Structure formats: structure tokens, C-alpha cells
Image (cartoon, rainbow, N blue to C red):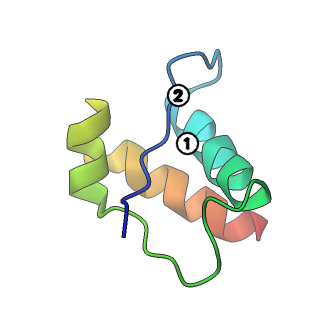
Amino acid sequence: MTMWVPDITQSNQPTYLAIVEAIGDAIRLGQLRPGDPLPTHRLLADLLGVNVSTITRAYREAAKRR
């Protein structure tokens, strides 16, 4: 199993919204399916070089949009 990590480097949006959009894109492209685990908040924050609260905000917003 490969861990999904978004590429948000080209986004002009706030980081949390870029992550939300990347999740949506990955679902539409079949890279993420229902039930697939996302990286933990801390791991994704470390991988993207952002604060854990940014990831929490992104995951919360993504959950609202489903």
C-alpha cells in the first residue's frame, strides 16, 4: 500500500484549502477510495512542512464537503 501525500506546491490557495482540493482531486482520479487511510495529522504536517493545526483544519473541511 502506498501512502497518499498531496502535491500542493502549485496552489495559490491557503494551504488548508489546497489540501482539501488535493483530497477531492485524488478521489475523483481514483487515487483515494472510500476507506483508504489518510496520513496522520502529524505525519502529513511533517511531510508538508506545515503546522498540525493546518492539517486538522483541512481534514475537518474535507469531511464537511463529502
Q: Quadrant of the C terminus?
A: bottom right
- Circle 1/circle 2 CB separation < 8 Å: yes
Residue pointed to by mark 1: 19
Residue 50 locus on image (x, y percent): 30, 33
- Residue depicted at x 52% and y 28%: 8
The residue lying at 64 percent from left, 74 percent from top is 33
Q: Residue at x 63, y 57 (%)?
A: 61
What is the crowding at mark 1: few (fewer than 14 residues within 10 Å), some, or many (at least 20)?
A: many
Q: Quadrant of the N terminus?
A: bottom left
- In the displayed structure, 50 sits above or below 35; it is above
Hey, which residue is sitting farthest bottom in the picture?
A: 35
Under mark 2, the amino acid is Ile
Please provide percent x and percent y for residue 56: 41, 57
Residue 50 visible, this orientation: no
Name the residue carrying label 2.
8
Examine the rendered structure and indicate whether residue 53 appears above or below residue 18.
below
Residue kind at label 1, given as amino acid type: Ile
Q: Quadrant of residue 17?
A: top right
Q: Which mark is residue 50?
A: none
